[in-house]
C-alpha cells in the first residue's frame, strides 16, 4: 500500500518521498521568490549607477564653472598671472639657494657676535685722513651689555682746514648715521681764514639693557668750506647700574 508521499511508477514499482514534505515545498518556494527579488533589484541598481557614470563623464565642468560658478567666486584674491604681474614675475625673485647665499645663517651671525657677548668695553682707532663733505661715519664700536646699565662713549681726533677761507667742520657721537636734524652733542671747529687745525673730543652716555647690542658711531661732516678729519678714536665702556 502506498503512503501519502509515495508515487507509483508506470512499471508498477514505487518511488518513496519523491515530492518531499509540505514544509520542504514552502522552503523551496521562499528561496525562489528571494532569488527573483535579488535579480530584479540588481537589474534596477546597476543600470542606475551606469547611467550616473555616463552623465558625470559627459558633464563639462569647465562650462559649469564659466556659466554658473565664476560669478560667485571670491574677488579678494589675485589669480597666479595677476600676482606675477603685480608683484614678481616668474624668475625675478630669489630662489632658496640664492637667498641662502645672500644672507647670514644663525650660526654665522652667532660667530660674528661671539666676541661682543658679555663684553664690557670696545675700542677703535688708527691713522686716518678723511676729506669731509656730506655726513659720514668715520669710526664705529659695538658691545653687548652683560647687565642693565650705561655705556660711556668718548671720542677724539682733529680737524684740518683745507680751504682758502672760513671753514666749519663737525662731528657727533651717535647711534645713527647723521648729524642733522638733532645738533646736540656736537663737536665742531670754526676756522675764520685759510689753513689751521684743531683738536676735538667728546663724551656721551647711553642706557642699555642686559643682552642688548649697542653700536655707536662717530659721524662727521663739512658744514662750511672744506677740510678733513684725521686720526680719530672711539671708546665705549660699560658701567652697571
Image (cartoon, rainbow, N blue to C red):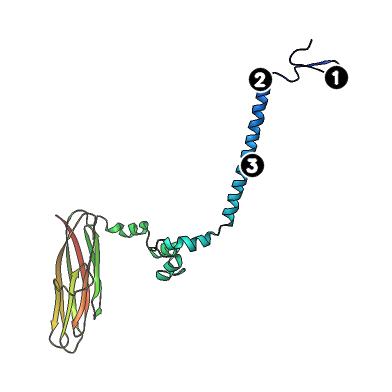
Of circles 1 and 3, which is in front?
A: 1
Q: Which residue is mark 3?
A: 43
Is 170 displayed left or right of 108 in the figure?
A: left
Residue 96 falls left or right of residue 52: left
Which residue is nearer to you in this view: 162 or 169? 169
Identify the residue position indicated by label 1 in the image. 10
Q: CA distance from mark 2 to mark 1?
A: 27 Å
Please tell me whether mark 1 sits on a helix, a strand or a loop.
Answer: loop
Say above or below: 61 vs 158.
Answer: above
Q: Earlier in the sequence, mark 2 or mark 3?
A: 2
Q: CA distance from mark 2 to mark 3?
A: 31 Å
Seen from the viewer's position, the closer of residues 233 and 12 is 12
Q: Nearer the viewer, mark 2 or mark 3?
A: 2
Q: What label sits on residue 23 in the rendered view?
A: 2
Relative side of 193 to 213, left or right: left
| Residue situated furthest bottom in the rendering | 164
Q: Earlier in the sequence, mark 2 or mark 1?
A: 1
Q: Where residue 57 sits in the image (x, y, percent)?
A: 59, 55
- Residue at position x 85%, y 19% from top? 10
Label 2 vs label 1, nearer the camera: 1
Quarter of the image with the C terminus in it = bottom left
Q: Residue at x 44, y 70 (%)?
A: 89
Determine crowd level at label 3: few under 14, some 14-19, many 20+ residues with C-alpha closer than 10 A.
few
The structure residue drawn at horizontal position 68% and vertical position 23%, both measured from the top left corner, is 25
Q: Say which element carries label 2.
A: helix
Residue 182: name its quadrant: bottom left
Q: Nearer the viewer, residue 66 or 75?
A: 66
The residue at the far top in this view is: 1
Residue at 44% in and 65% down:
79
Separation of residues labelled 1 and 3 (CA atoms): 44 Å
Mark 1 or 3, nearer chain start = 1
Amino acid at each position: 500500500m502506498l503512503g501519502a508521499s509515495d508515487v507509483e511508477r508506470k512499471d508498477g514499482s514505487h518511488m518513496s518521498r519523491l515530492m518531499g514534505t509540505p514544509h520542504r515545498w514552502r522552503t523551496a518556494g521562499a528561496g525562489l521568490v528571494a532569488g527573483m527579488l535579488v535579480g530584479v533589484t540588481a537589474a534596477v541598481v546597476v543600470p542606475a549607477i551606469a547611467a550616473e557614470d555616463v552623465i558625470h563623464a559627459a558633464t563639462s565642468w569647465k562650462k559649469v564653472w564659466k556659466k554658473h560658478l565664476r560669478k560667485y567666486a571670491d574677488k579678494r584674491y589675485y589669480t597666479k598671472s595677476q600676482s606675477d604681474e603685480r608683484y614678481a614675475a616668474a624668475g625675478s625673485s630669489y630662489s632658496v639657494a640664492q637667498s641662502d647665499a645672500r644672507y647670514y645663517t644663525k650660526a654665522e651671525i652667532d660667530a660674528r657676535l661671539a666676541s661682543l657677548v658679555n663684553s664690557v668695553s670696545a675700542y677703535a682707532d688708527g691713522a686716518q685722513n678723511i676729506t669731509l663733505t656730506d655726513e659720514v661715519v668715520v669710526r664705529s664700536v659695538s658691545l653687548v651689555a652683560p647687565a642693565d646699565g650705561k655705556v660711556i662713549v668718548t671720542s677724539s681726533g682733529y680737524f684740518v682746514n683745507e680751504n682758502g677761507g672760513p671753514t666749519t667742520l663737525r662731528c657727533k657721537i651717535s647711534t645713527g648715521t647723521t648729524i642733522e636734524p638733532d645738533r646736540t652733542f656736537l663737536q665742531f671747529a670754526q676756522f675764520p681764514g685759510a689753513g689751521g687745525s684743531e683738536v676735538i673730543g667728546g663724551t656721551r652716555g647711553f642706557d642699555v639693557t642686559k643682552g642688548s647690542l649697542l653700536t655707536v658711531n662717530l659721524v662727521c661732516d663739512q658744514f662750511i668750506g672744506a677740510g678733513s678729519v684725521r686720526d680719530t678714536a672711539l671708546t665705549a665702556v660699560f658701567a652697571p647700574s
